Amino acid sequence: MKKTILLLGGLTITVNILLGVLISVYSVFNMGVNCGIIAINTVLLVSLYVLNVRDAFRISFSFLFSILAIVEIILGCLMPQKLQDNGYLIASLVSLFFEIIPIVVINILSNKIKK
């Protein structure tokens, strides 16, 4: 499953780059942000399988992370081309924070349940 997720992540990054080259309105800044979002979310999804997380947690958080990734990509497309005072970037970072914290928590809970 890890290989499948990595393959889909790589394919998605490739399609994102091709869209960045082909669509003139899609700037290099937005393309770079979305490539980063895709890469980070791919790593988060793979980490659910690497950390020996319980199946129920893995399935539910896989859906949640995928939905949040789609929202982050939409925000990345709408994002203005600046780093300072960028509300879309702040929203993406907060969303990323709410993806990382559950991974830490469910890893701790899964380890305690197994004992």
Image (spheres, helix red, strand yellow):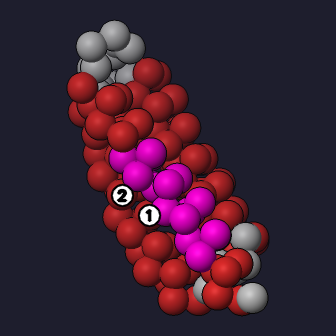
Residue in the picture at 41% in, 74% down: 63
- What is the chief secondary structure element of the magenta stretch? helix
Of residue 100 and residue 32, the one placed in the foreground of this image is 100
Residue in the picture at 44% in, 64% down: 65
Query: Is residue 61 among the parts visible in the rendering?
Result: yes
96 inside magenta stretch: yes
Q: Amino acid at mark 1?
A: Phe
Q: Amino acid at mark 2?
A: Leu
Placement of the N terminus among the 4 image quadrants:
bottom right
Residue under label 2, please give it: 68
Q: Is residue 69 left or right of residue 48?
A: left
Where is residue 62? Give x, y as percent.
49, 73
Position above or below: 101 against 23:
below
The answer to whether mark 1 and mark 2 are in CB contact below 8 A is: yes
Dot 1: element? helix
Position above or below: 54 against 74:
below
Specify the segment rendered in magenta: 95-109
Residue under label 1, please give it: 65
